[in-house]
Amino acid sequence: MSRTAIIGGGISGLSTAFYLKEYSRGDMECMVFESSSRWGGKIASAQESGFLIEGGPDSFLAQKQATLDLCRSLGLQSHILPSNTGTGPSTYVWSGGKLKAMPEGMMLMAPTMFLPMLRSNLISWAGKLRMAMEVIIPPSHSNADESLGSFVRRRLGQEVLDKIAGPLMAGIYSADPERLSLRSTFPMFVEMERSHGSLVLGMMRRKKPQHKTTKLQPGTAKPQPMFVSLAGGVQELTDALARQLEPKDLKLQCRVNSVSFENGQYILELLDGSTITADHVVFTTPAFVTADILDELDPVLAAKLRGIRYVSTATVSLGFKRSDIKCPLNGFGFIVPSTEGRRINACSWSSRKFDNRAPEDSVLLRVFVGGALGEQFAEQDEQALIELAREELRTILGITAKPVLAKAYRWRKASPQYEVGHHDRVAEIERLAATHPGLYLTGSSFHGAGIPDCVLRGMDTAIKIVKADARANCNCNDTTAPVTAEETPNVIA
């Protein structure tokens, strides 16, 4: 029986282990090594005083089926919780000392409806005129990667970049839009420009066929929400994954120092000096951590991995009595452009976004700090972060009351930056890794940092390992494997 060692116990590592167990039908041994004292990585949920706090991601995209399918496989179907809907604006922008509604019909950074944009007080008339010109600006014919900042400025103008696209991208990728790779984050925008000659026209045409329904629970069909969570918090997902694996194969507080290769097997040296042998090794750790472990085996690959930059972020959850909040908290929250000079990036009204996040007489707010344009704020201690968040909310929302709950999570160098050239960098990393049969790189460093992306890549990695093991066992060169398209419809699709 072959053995696979998975380094890293976040969503990527646990998903890989789960699917490896499923697709090998239990015929492969799998061990997961996690250096910290808990499973889940940046996924962390906590119940305190009737509040449900999310330290990392609080939801995942419903349009990407991988996580929904995994939830069903784990028996979490009835726990799937769609985000709430409302009749007013869902997002606000802090601009010029006021909260201004994001125009209705904005899809990421382009309008799909003209009247709401014309009526909006967020963008100046000069900015609206510049946006309108987008439909006549000729498309670029360059195949070179471009920063998101350059693309938005070229197509829609500086004001849309500053007030909408920049802060939205900072929220999704914790990134500087002037360095963020368009090809690696939003390749659909490149395709829209090429196919339609206009981002605005492309978004409007793309919106028309998207009136879908999704069955979140058996026997129901509802309009598909953009985001869904789990009733007990996103950590329900990683907890359920860990329960599916054998306790003897889960190694918490077990750091892997180095990996070498000898006599057809990988040798993992652990922090305590002991060693483990494996036929396959899967790295789901941040690229710079993977690089340190691989230095001995392949210093060139390690150097390439260190080329992926990481930044620090933090979240601060604050619970208040509803009677202490004078502002209406309509919608899901607000974003803050970097040009406004504030110390926070955004604030989510968690108890408005999802049900059962706070007691009936309370509200829960979550403040986002740090990222590429403000790392120094995220690297403070917990109490300083809480004070920072309170001071910012006092200015923006007028909240002067003392919170009944305050908790900060700091994520030091935990957010990978998909910078211009990322696609080519990853291609070279994957070429180098492929020279080591049985060595696999997955996780958020390469092809998507969202939960569905990590789940899908973990699934794909598991299938590759099962196929490689089947070829090795039958000692043949064909690509036939015991996993068929019918057995893995979600991957093939």
Image (tube, rainbow, N blue to C red):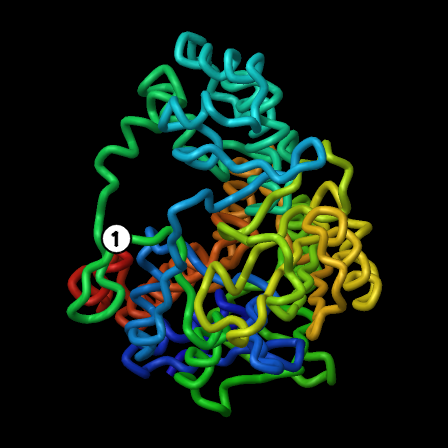
In the image, 70: left or right of 392?
left
What's the residue at 80%, 52% (across, down)? Answer: 377
In the depicted structure, whether residue 64 falls above or below residue 230: above
Q: Which amino acid is tagged 1? A: Pro
The residue identified by callout 1 is 223
Q: Quadrant of the N terminus?
A: bottom left
What's the residue at 71%, 36% (across, down)? Answer: 97
| Relative image position of residue 402 (x, y in whole percent) | 76, 68
| Relative image position of residue 258 (x, y in whole percent) | 68, 69
What's the residue at 49%, 39% (across, down)? Answer: 185
In the depicted structure, whether residue 90 falls above or below residue 176: below
In the image, 481: left or right of 112?
left
In the depicted structure, whether residue 111 falls above or below residue 277: above
Identify which residue, 274 or 477, lies in the foreground. 274
Identify which residue, 203 or 32, lies in the foreground. 203
Q: Quadrant of residue 319?
A: bottom right
| Relative image position of residue 356 (x, y in whole percent) | 46, 73
What's the residue at 67%, 65% (across, down)? Answer: 324
Identify which residue, 29 or 50, lies in the foreground. 50
Q: Quadrant of residue 65?
A: bottom left
Check disc 1: other Cα within 10 Å, few if <14, some if 14-19, many if 20+. Answer: few
Q: Is residue 415 visible?
A: yes
| Relative image position of residue 179 (x, y in whole percent) | 65, 33
Q: How many numbered markers are drawn? A: 1
Q: Is residue 262 visible?
A: no
